[in-house]
Image (cartoon, grey):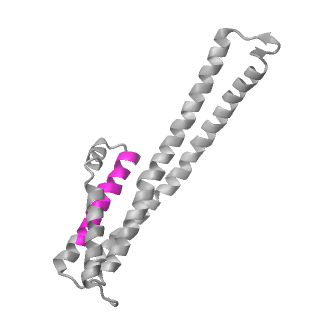
Amino acid sequence: MIGKKNIVFGFLFLVLSAGLGPLMVNMYADFGTAAGEKQQTVGRLQTMQQNEFEEELEPMSADQIARANTQGILSLNKLFNTELAIDQIKGGPHAHGNLESLLNIAVGITIGFLVVASWLKQLISWLFIIGTVMHSGMLYLSTVFDMVWAETLLQTGIGPICILAGLLITGISCIIGYKTSP
């Protein structure tokens, strides 16, 4: 069965991309620390502003205000950077990897119901595998492992093009030769 490789690949790649979930959960500990730090420094700024920039009934100097502002800005930046790292994994390799894994499983099953030339089934099969590796795989390598060369390959757009071509050819093949039993 030609689609078997897509089904096997899809399940194995799904394990890999779904495995990013625990990695993201571990990153939330840093997020919680950064959120607490931000709350403390921004809360101090709010209190200073409400007290017309007096602490312990003494007017604050410009230097003290500037230092407090700097701490607040840096804590906000730390929180945004921590959140950005989580969002890059969540919106990139995790989401796309899960979707493309399921697409491979679905197309593997669909290929079993197609009555078309063997080379066409092979083309569909390989388009989805190559597309997934060149899209989600490169997202994984560039986002999680900071491999710049993977980002370069990702920017070629070959992965999404392969998947879209595979979807188009699969749709046309279903029109031509879809049968109701494998």
Residue found at x 55% / y 52%: 25
Q: Can residue 16 be spotted in the picture?
A: no
Where residue 89 sits in the image (x, y, percent)?
45, 50
110 vs 58, nearest the viewer: 110
- Quarter of the picture containing the N terminus is bottom left
Q: Residue at x 59, y 45 (%)?
A: 29
Instruction: Identify the image quadrant of residue 66.
Output: top right
Residue 39 placed where, x, y %? 68, 34
Give the magenta range.
124-143
Specify whether 90 is left or right of 130.
right
Q: Quadrant of residue 101?
A: bottom left
Quarter of the image with the C terminus is bottom left
Above or below residue 112? Residue 95 is above
Asked whether, in this view, residue 135 is left or right of residue 65, the answer is: left
Residue 129 part of the magenta segment: yes
| Closest to the observer, 170 or 36 | 170
Our reading of the magenta stretch's main secondary structure is helix
Q: Is residue 22 above or below residue 42?
A: below
Question: Which residue is at the far bottom?
Answer: 181
Q: Position of residue 180 (x, y in %)?
A: 34, 89
Residue drawn 63% across and 38% down? 35
Residue 98 colored in magenta in the image? no
